[in-house]
Image: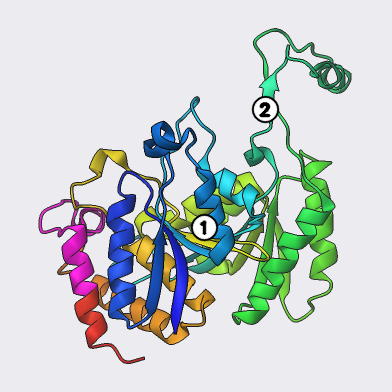
Amino acid sequence: MTHEVVLIPGDGIGPEITRAAQRVVAAAGVDISWHEVQAGAGVIDQYGAPLPDHVIDAIRTYGVALKGPITTPVGSGFRSVNVALRHAFNLYACVRPCASMPGDGSRYDNVDLVIIRENSEDLYAGIEFDADSVGAGAIADTVKKQTGKELGPQTAISIKPISRAASERIVRYAFEYARANGRKKVTAVHKANIMKCTDGLYLHVARDVAAEYPDIAFEDKIVDAACMGLVMHPEDFDVLVLPNLYGDIVSDLSAGLIGGLGMAPGANIGDGCAIFEATHGSAPDIAGQDVANPTAEILSACMLLDHLGETTAAARIRAAVRVTLSSGASVTQDVRRALTGSYDGAVGTTQFTDEVIDALSRMVV
């Protein structure tokens, strides 16, 4: 069976790591027809936007994509392509597994958790404006009423929308994910002790949904306490479900427990579309040098294969990655440094991928 999948190589190290993922998927014997389209800063001159209409059309046509990282300007420039894609296709669930692998270079060997992040609202939606802009008067009045302080000039405001509908949808997704994948506990993460309206609503909804799943243990944790707990006792966690901004931060923290962002795959899931991508950025400082770790993108491709029903191939690839990392002989510089404190002996993106493919040829699952 041939699967039709959109490929967005991205920029920075994106083309290198997506190429590695394509090679590994092909070596696993899965037949994919890749429909390659470009997005990001490099296409603005040609198409007038970082996310051209034909990219949206391709994803809408095929319903599934593998994506490389795309640079988002800091503090200025165009809107995040990632955020735009999530909004365009209502990709409300961001799923980021974090599992230890032998030889991953981390300080832990017992991490096996999944971050499920609400993708559509919260502060991360980027609804911001200056306090002296049109429409800010009502907000300024509310701030003065609640705090007694005036919003002076050169003040910026960010809106944190949290809805019952989106909260229920993401928490229910987390419980259904836990059931489907043999997970035992869901932890809802929040800051409801301070943000009583927004996070308070999220927590209230999470408790209501949890009552419908008596077979799955439930707890809630304030986000700062959850971060401390993850660092001290990551084995206490299983599935974590979080509003958008906390989910972004905690998923990176959790990646640090398994060797770094180079090890952390991810998926953005909606009702009729799914986009799979590594959780890290585009790392333009090392682009084109054949040194990037493609593991996260390869494992994201495994999540893609699971989504397509190619579960045996996905399991074989994951096993091959584990064998390659555990041998320690052919790892990229980020892993080598974590293991030894030095880059000496590290291999490049291409050679690491070659080693995974070689291990894959010997792999029976």
Which residue reaches farthest left?
345
Q: Nearer the viewer, residue 239 or 125?
A: 125
Magenta segment: 332-356
**Residue 20: % across, % down:** 28, 64
- What count of labels does the image hold? 2
Disc number placed over residue 58 in the picture, else none = 1
Determine which quarter of the picture holds residue 185: bottom right
Would residue 164 be visible to someone looking at this image?
yes
Residue type at the position of mark 1: Ala
- Picture quarter with the C terminus: bottom left
**Residue 139: % across, % down:** 82, 22
Determine which quarter of the picture holds residue 60: bottom right
Q: From the viewer's perspective, tell me whether residue 176 is left or right of residue 100.
A: right
Q: Secondary structure at mark 1?
A: helix
Residue at 15 percent across and 69 percent down: it is: 329
Residue under label 2, please give it.
128
| Residue 257 part of the magenta-drawn span | no
Determine which quarter of the picture holds residue 207: bottom right
Q: From the viewer's perspective, tell me whether residue 261 is left or right of residue 16.
A: right
**Residue 161: % across, % down:** 76, 40
Disc number placed over residue 116 in the picture, else none = none
Q: Nearer the viewer, residue 74 or 339?
A: 74
Q: Nearer the viewer, residue 97 or 109?
A: 97
Mark found first going from the N terminus, 2 or 1: 1
Rate crowding at label 1 as few (under 14), some (14 to 19) or many (20 or more) other CA atoms within 10 Å.
some
Which residue reaches farthest top?
153
Rate crowding at label 2 as few (under 14), some (14 to 19) or many (20 or more) other CA atoms within 10 Å.
few
Indicate whether 107 appears above or below 222.
below
Would residue 322 be visible to someone looking at this image?
no
Indicate whether 221 appears above or below 360.
above
